[in-house]
Image: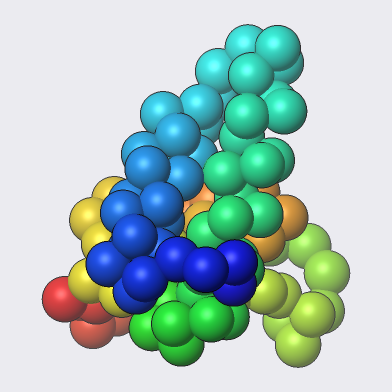
Amino acid sequence: MLDLTPEEVRRLRELADQIAMGTQGRPCWLSGARSTSIGILQRVSDWLGDACGHIDATPERPGPALLRLPCVRPFGHSGLHLDAHGHSWVSLPGEEPRT
Ligand SMILES: [Zn+2]
């Protein structure tokens, strides 16, 4: 990933994570910033290999469970999980906290 140091990549991910979560549910004119930040989160997660990885297990969610993408936010994050398609969700009651 470019010529960034691991520390620079972590800072980039932190910024992308803040933008992605800050644009959650915001007006559509922020969708470009949101999709870019989610793309950065996915690439950094692939590169560092330390993403949260939680998968939405909500029974009401439509579609096959095997096609659900894992959370691309950093391991141990707080708040909502977020996949590479911009879908966000909360952990189900009783699930292990991801800390
Ligand atoms: Zn997560």
Q: Position of residue 7 (x, y in %)?
A: 27, 67
Q: Is residue 90 left or right of residue 38?
A: left
Residue in the foreground of this view, choosing between 14 and 62: 14
Q: Quadrant of residue 98?
A: bottom left
Q: Position of residue 57 (x, y in %)?
A: 54, 75
Q: Position of residue 4 (x, y in %)?
A: 45, 66
86 vs 91: above or below: above
Residue in the foreground of this view, choosing between 69 and 45: 45
9 vs 86: above or below: below
Q: Is residue 68 left or right of residue 72?
A: right
Q: Residue at x 34, y 60 (%)?
A: 8
Q: Residue at x 23, y 56 (%)?
A: 78
Quadrant the C terminus occupies: bottom left
Q: Position of residue 52 (x, y in %)?
A: 39, 76
Residue 58 in sight from this viewpoint = no
Q: Residue at x 44, y 82 (%)?
A: 48
Residue in the foreground of this view, choosing between 9 and 21: 9
Q: Residue at x 52, y 68 (%)?
A: 3
Quadrant the N terminus occupies: bottom right
